[in-house]
Each structure stands twice: as structure tokens, then as C-alpha cells.
Amino acid sequence: MTVAPAIVERLCAAAGPGGWTMDQHDIAPHLVEARGLFRGASPLLLKPPDTAAVATIMAICHETRTKVVPQGGNTGLVGGATPFDGGDEVLLSLARMNRVRAIDALDNTLTVEAGCTLAAVQQAAASADRLFPLRIASEGSCTIGGNLSTNAGGTQVIRYGNTRDLVLGIEAVLPDGRVWNGLRALRKDNTGYDLKQLFIGGEGTLGVITAAVLKLFPRPRDVQTAMVAVPSPAAGIELLSLGRGLTGDQLTAFELMARIGLDFVLRHVPATADPFRDRHDWYALIEVSGGDSPGALRPAMEALLETALERGLAVDAVLAESVAQAQALWRLREDLSDAQKPEGGSIKHDISVPVSRMADFIARADVAVRALVPNCRPVAFGHVGDGNVHFNVSQPVGADRAVFLARWGEVNKVVHDIAAGLDGSISAEHGIGRLKRDELVHYKGAVELDLMRAVKAALDPRGIMNPGKMV
Ligand code: ZN
């Protein structure tokens, strides 16, 4: 099955000159998920220039029951933006819609189109002496539309929340081609269902987000960054609590990383160095930011590190003396995902549990996966300040990659069961997409699934929006 030529012709006309391609060489990068876990097929990539064109495209797709896969920067990790291999879905890229529509320093809002890269959004905010706090490793290539559709998390969630907490309004094109202009810049709007939140984190299954009004924050005048060697994840969690108290809750990042993760980075990423003389089992990367002048938060950070050392919550600590040093510390954390690749196959998890149960989760999952796959190498790291850990499991040294990866579902089941038993989630920030669709059915309650399916059926009765994803 594919898309009929007459439909393709109408869709191309709607996208306008330069707004489409059928060249498989150009389409190829859009057909594969970032980690190579999923591949698909599509005869047509549409790149409309504006909301009106998206609306026309969706109206045609609705009328002809043509399936649509919306796509931002294609950096997602669950196959949510990858078509299936039937060749009967058209790709809808928002890349050309990358204008900053408005910026208002008094309202503290920024109105942008879906195709703006996250880095461009951050820069636009900075140009008005404001902060847009969403920060993720792919910020140079991911787009704000994708961030919204997947409710991206990242490293600043502890202070500013997930993407859904950073949005005041959206504009979306519905599956039938109608445009919902919900671009309100209101901090308070108590007029019924908060419809924008259906589309945020909706993974493109309910419509296409074309623009958004984002919240801006004061730009921090000071940032202090430290790497702390901690004796255990439990000590790390205590350090987190201490940090919040001693810094007046100005903690903007709190990342935990096992030693093996640092080993991988030092081995595979050029120009990295261990900030400590001795080896330690666990590390916390702590960032405190805010204040009214450079250096304002240094005394608070120093007090935190001293107290942590006194109380045995820290074994050693390094406080960055410059922006360059802070960046070097962040690289040790942010390059970890890439540094896992040369170590062979890695079975991924994106778990969240209540912060108080994080240490328990890591301990139990560690024992369970080692029992299941002898000599496998758990690489726990992540945003433990939010109760979120990427509990990835690297293959045993010298093992066959394919044989190890064939146990993906089995390992997932064990880890996800432990998370569920601790009142956690199987997807903290990466979403469901194709990767966890079947598992969602297993872990969500019947009532919750009914509600999700009812929403999907109400907004997309013909099932053309990113079918086969999430619900
Ligand atoms: Zn993450």
C-alpha cells in the first residue's frame, strides 16, 4: 500500500514550491530513529511554510484518510517520529516554520513557531535578557515543536519543570484541518479543560502543534557548578535534600552518575579528564544558579560542599572556577550516552520513581539485571533530582551484541516491574512512541487507558495522526 498519486499531487500543491520532496535520498534521514532502533518508509516528505499550509494538508489527509507522521528535529528516542514500513504514511516536517513571532519582556513570554530549534529559542530569550530554561543534550538540532509534543525533560526540570510547565499557550492544527488558536499569554486562565496539555506530550497523535507561547524567566546572574564524589546513591539523595535547603532552593541541576559511566566517557570522549585524583563509586553533578551578581551564590555552594563532606554525604568535591571548567564537568555527564555506544549493545530504560525511593530502585534493579544477564554492566545515570534515572544496561565485555540486544524485552520487564512496584513510571521523559506502546497497555490502569483512547477517538476519529504510536 502507498499513497495514491492524485493525493500526493494535492498535498504537494498545498505545501507549495520548495515545500515537499519525493527524493528518497532526501527523505532517508527522516525514516530512521536516532539510535537506529526503528526504520520506516514514506513516499513523501512535506515541509509547509506556515500554519495555513499545514491546515490545508491536514484537511486533505482527513478527507482522503491519509496517515501523517509529524516530525521535528527527529531526535526522539522512542520511535515516535518514525513512520512504519508500509509506505502509506506521509511525513510532515515543521522545519521551515522557524520564525520567532514575538517576544515580550514585560509579559515574560516568547512566541515561536514549532520548527525553531531549542538553541534558537534559548538565544531569542537571551537576546531579551531572559532565560528559557529547557536544556537537553540535543538542543542544537531538536525543535521546540518536538519538545512540546514529547514533553521533553532534561537537566533543569528540578527547578523549572518539564516542557509542559513552560508553556502558556499553543496553536495547533487538528486532524481535520481546523486551526485552534490557543496562543494566549495568560498566567491565569481558569476557563475549563486545559486543552493545550492534551497536545503537549501527545506525541503528534492528536494534531500538529504549529506555534507556542513560552514562559520566560529572569536570566541567572550567577551559576556555580560542582562535581561531588558521593559514597552511594542514598548519600546522593540526602545531598540533594541538603542542597535544596542550603541554597534557598536555587538548585537548578542535580545529576547522579555511576563510576562506570565516567569510565566510558574518559575512555571514548577525547579531551576529557577525571576531575578527581582517586576513583569513586558515584558522582553527583550539582548546579546552583540565580542571584543578582556574578559570584553571589559561591558562598552557598561552598557551604553546601563543606557540610556534605563533614556529614559523610560527600567523599570529595570539585567546584568549577570558570565557565570552561563548568562546561568540562557538564561534558562528563552529557557525553555519557554517546560514550556508551563503543561499549556495544545497551538496553535502555528511562525510569522515574519518587525521589525518596530512587536509591532503593537503583539497588534492586542492579541486582536483578545482573542475575538475569551475568556480567552485564548497569550504567545508572540521570536526573535524580527529579527521581529520573536512565538505567541503561551495557552488554558484557566480549559478548555478542545481537544476542544481548535480543534480551531487550526480558530486561525491560524486570526493570519496569521494579519501577512499577515502587510507584514509578516506565517513561519519565522520553515518551512512549513505538518503543513502549505495548508496555503502556501493561502498566497503565484500564480506566486511564480508556480515557486516553476516548480522547484519541474524539480528536482524531479517522485515526490518521501518527497512527500506531502511544495509544
Ligand atoms: Zn535524560
Image (cartoon, grey):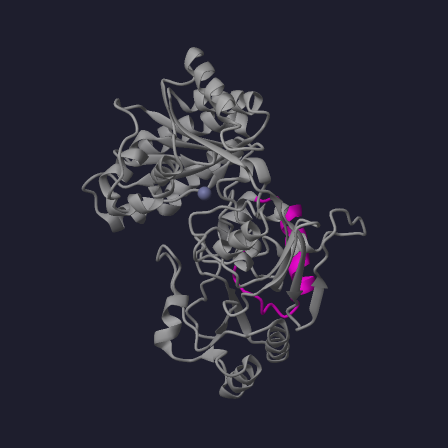
Above or below for 448 versus 466: above
Above or below for 277 versus 409: above
| Farthest residue, direction front | 293
Describe residue 22's horizontal placement relative to residue 213 as left or right: left
Please give the name of the residue rendered at 54% of the width and 70% of the height, measured from the top-left corner. 68
Instruction: Pick whichever, 20 or 204, lies toward us.
Output: 20
Describe residue 407's horizontal placement relative to residue 203 as left or right: left
Q: Which contiguous range is marked in magenta?
A: 444-471
- Residue 253 in view (yes/no): no
Please give the name of the residue rendered at 58% of the width and 52% of the height, measured from the top-left corner. 201
Residue 49 lies, in percent from the top left, at 55, 74
Please give the name of the residue rendered at 64% of the width and 75% of the height, measured from the top-left corner. 52
Describe residue 280's horizontal placement relative to residue 427 as left or right: left
| Farthest residue, direction right | 191
Where residue 282 sits, quadrant-wise, is: top left
Picture quadrant of ligand 1: top left
Residue 355 lies, in percent from the top left, at 53, 29
Residue 340 lies, in percent from the top left, at 30, 43
Instruction: Pick whichever, 448 or 164, lies toward us.
Output: 164
